[in-house]
Image (cartoon, rainbow, N blue to C red):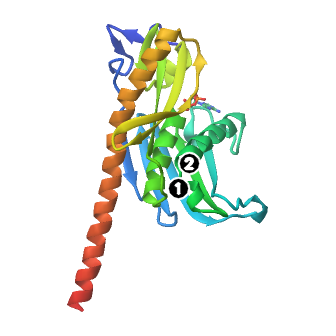
Amino acid sequence: MSEPEKLIVDGLRLDGRKFDELRPIKIEANVLKRADGSCYLEMGKNKVIAAVYGPREVHPRHLQDPSRAVIRYRYNMAPFSVEERKRPGPDRRSIEISKVSKEVFEAVIMKELFPRSAIDIFVEVLQADAGSRTACLNAASVALVDAGVPMKGIVTSVAVGKADGQLVLDPMKEEDNYGEADLPFAFLIRSGKIESIALLQMDGCMTREEVRQAVELAKKGALRIYKMQRDAILKRYLEAEEEMEEIAEGREDA
Ligand code: ADP
């Protein structure tokens, strides 16, 4: 990717978005038969899939915690997910993303309800275009609800970048590569209200005032994503209800 001369032209970003606009988002829950919960999510050109297993028995058993469930999170990028083939397997970056993402869900899942068990969250990045960790957190959150894992709220994640001196919501690849800063956020949202910041990372430089503005911009974006997560979950449960009704009707006919 060659460096563009400017990241913002006539007040618009290179993909035509305003500074406070998200990329198009698509969310579908319950996409994998063998997982307890799953989700496919697109955020712009990011395409990710999350699978949740558990609560289930911990292997190896010495990792069991008698007071709570162990939360495990694996972020993995497919070799074909980036422009130049990525070597398969974990690297420093994916280990770091897995660690911070796990900590987000440790704070949100009611893990004390499931002593000695494990809740495994696997996220696979099929296509990456900056902000893949945020897309994965959003997908994992929906997959956890799909699996029926009790949580204090929903995790919703979005980044704020700085491009040509301007704060931009949900930066894409060019803004991430050639911008001045990138701040991924995750929020805990309960009943439509932001309860707390569950993740805040920072790459690059921002002034104190810019960080304050970035938090506000991220919150606005997160509330919009939250609505889409909620819609995907509602759709999934409505489908389940219809299926149950069909089964019940089938029984009556028999
Ligand atoms: P995030 O995807 O959460 O923004 P980074 O800021 O570390 O995480 O990465 C930004 C983008 O850089 C990724 O979304 C991806 O498009 C690209 N990228 C990351 N790792 C690699 C890699 N090993 N090879 C090529 N591109 C990569």
Which of the pair 121/114 is nearer the observer? 114
Residue on which disc 2 sits: 123
> Going 61% across and 66% down the picture, which residue do you hit?
56
Residue 138 is at least partly visible in this image = yes
* Alpha-carbon span between mark 1 and mark 2: 6 Å
**Callout 2: SS:** strand
* Residue kind at label 1, given as amino acid type: Ala
Q: Is residue 165 above or below residue 182?
A: above
**Callout 1: SS:** strand
Within 10 angstroms of label 2, few (less than 14), some, or many (20 or more) residues?
many
Q: Is residue 48 above or below residue 59?
A: above
Whole-percent x, y for residue 27 in the image? 38, 46
Whole-percent x, y for residue 225 in the image? 36, 37
Do the residues bearing badges 1 and 2 touch, measured as CB atoms within 8 Å? Answer: yes
Which of the pair 193/18 is nearer the observer? 193
Q: Which quarter of the rendered picture does the C terminus lie within? A: bottom left
